[in-house]
Amino acid sequence: MTTRSGTRTEGTRQTHGWAGCLAVVAGFVTGFVAWGVGAAPGLRGAFEGERDLSLLYLDGPVIIFGAPALALGVWALVGGVLRARDRVAAVAVLIVLAAVAWGCGEWLEMRTDRFTRGDSW
């Protein structure tokens, strides 16, 4: 809270609205890169052009839109509900996005395994 002179009073905390937007943008970038790298073998095709299009219309939107939703949820939980500082919330978002990128990479590696092994069963 500010007084008429423009100085802040003790006990109040000012949050930055752009930081939450930055968390969403980081989530979009993380989701898009994780999906793009992981789904590429299945979208390129294997023997005789066999492709898995569910990577495009199912896994793609879930990963690309799920990562920013999760980042925003963590930002709101840590920054808003737990009343942590913006730096702590940013670190929490980065840790969650790293875990999301790893998890999506593992999931997509399992889904595209038959395209990278060389045999198409």
Image (cartoon, rainbow, N blue to C red):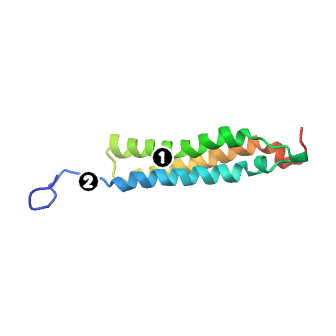
Q: Which residue is mark 1?
A: 71
Looking at the picture, how far across and down is residue 21, in whole percent?
Answer: 42, 52
Looking at the picture, how far across and down is residue 51, in whole percent?
Answer: 81, 43
Asked if one can make out residue 49 in the rendered structure from this viewpoint, the answer is: yes
Q: Nearer the viewer, residue 75 or 44?
A: 44
- Tell me the SS state at disc 2: loop
Residue depicted at x 14% and y 61%? 7
Badge 1, how many Cα within 10 Å: few under 14, some, many 20+? many
Q: Is residue 107 left or right of residue 11?
A: right
Q: Toward which corner of the image does residue 61 lie, by quadrant?
A: top right
Looking at the picture, how far across and down is residue 67, in whole percent?
Answer: 54, 45
Could you tell me the amino acid type at mark 1? Ala
Q: Which residue is mark 2?
A: 14
Which of the marked residues, 1 or 2, is nearer the chain's N terminus? 2
Q: Quadrant of the C terminus?
A: top right
Q: Is residue 76 left or right of residue 105?
A: left
